[in-house]
Amino acid sequence: MAEKVVIIGSGPAAHTAAIYTARAEFKPVLFEGFMAGGIAAGGQLTTTTEVENFPGFPEGISGPDLCDRFRAQSQRFDVTIHTETITKLDLSSRPFKYWSDERSGEADTIILATGATAKRLDIPGAGEGPGEFWQRGVSACAVCDGALPMFRNQPLAVIGGGDSAMEEASFLTKFASKVYLLARRDELRASKIMVQRVLANPKIEMLYSHECTAALGTDGLERIRVKNLKDGKERELDCMGLFFAIGHVPNTGFLDGQIKTDAQGYVVTTPGSTVTSVPGVFAAGDVQDKKYRQAITAAGSGCMAAIDAEHFIAAQG
Ligand code: FAD
């Protein structure tokens, strides 16, 4: 028999949808993924330290602890949770069909809450494995890693030219002795106010028309090699931390074009709702949101998806 509601994802959007649909007695089944999109079950918050802006935790709470609490609340309402990644869907007719590596089944409605993953650059030395410095100085998240002792009073670098790169560079100046901001073009695509803030910060040195060509060090990152794209000259800079701030990829590849997405792959929803291009499939959280990208907005849209799914099921009789 088809499940009434299948939820795909494991962040605040997925668990909020699960809590709401479970309390409405739809017996939701949630696939939390197994390192889906390169991130542990629990989603992006598992990669951060302190969350201080989620209401209800006046002292702040660690990202992984908050994820554990989301999951525990789903379990309290008997949500069935599979630690499996959904690899394929057939949305051509209802009930929809779904597959993980371990099972397949049918669903009357599906809530997509698969989130997004931060992009990384393929720079020699910045990857994983011997002689590479991923998580040993190279990171894709200044907000989570910037405050680590290894980065205190050290020269750091951020790569990117958008608002998040500006934000991350400014954030890192709280800890760093200096922050290099590398942008490939000779202008920044970030908003004017963010650019002004960066340019006014004495700790930030803008390197326009520059790219990073290597991450260098011994036990951890110590230097980066940068190339001036205008004259082709390369030089090395002391740098103990290299942060990618070049955007995110929504986890929508497994949809295989069956749902309408925008040019960047984000699921398109009808404004003010979680309705997608396929009736009965709803989307919540960062997989459909490239503007707000916050835990609380993801949770809010998870609630909306649950209510939209409930209404859809009721309308089907
Ligand atoms: P995500 O958290 O993106 O999780 C979705 C998860 O679903 C994936 O990670 C994966 O585990 C799973 N999944 C993906 N594909 C599949 C599949 N095919 N099958 C099964 N499972 C799948 N927000 C705040 O409000 N406050 C903060 O302090 C804060 N700090 C942050 C720090 C960092 C470093 C980062 C990266 C983000 C931070 N955010 C913060 C943003 C916040 O984490 C996100 O907005 C929020 O987690 C998005 O939630 P989501 O439910 O959309 O999904």
Image (cartoon, rainbow, N blue to C red):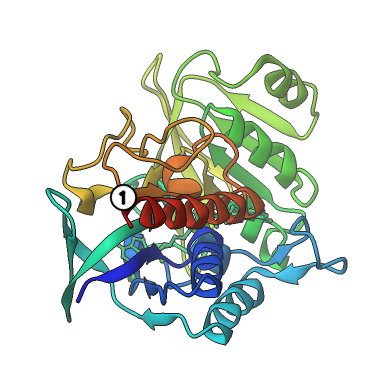
Compared across the picture, whether 145 is left or right of 249 comes to: right
Residue 309 percent location from the top left of the image: 42, 55
The residue sitting at 56% across, 73% down in the picture is: 23
Q: Is residue 240 above or below residue 212?
A: below
Give the residue type that dot 1 points to.
Answer: Gly
Q: Is residue 8 above or below residue 273?
A: below
- Assign the N terminus to one quadrant of the image: bottom left
Residue 203 visible, this angle: yes
Image coordinates of residue 197 in percent, x first then y, are 77, 24
Tell me if 87 is positioned left or right of 14 in this view.
left
Question: In the visual, does 252 lie left or right of 254?
Answer: right
Residue 253 in percent (x, y) is at: 23, 49
Please state which of residues 51 and 255 is positioned toward the viewer in this rendering.
255
Q: Residue at x 45, y 35 (%)?
A: 226
Which of the 4 image quadrants contains residue 90? bottom left
Residue at the spot of label 1? 280
Q: Nearer the viewer, residue 202 or 95?
A: 95
Going 55% across and 49% down the picture, which residue do you hit? 301
Where is the C terminus found, in terms of image quarters? bottom left
Residue 173 x, y percent position in the rendering: 76, 43
Tell me the SS state at disc 1: loop
Q: Nearer the viewer, residue 112 or 128?
A: 112
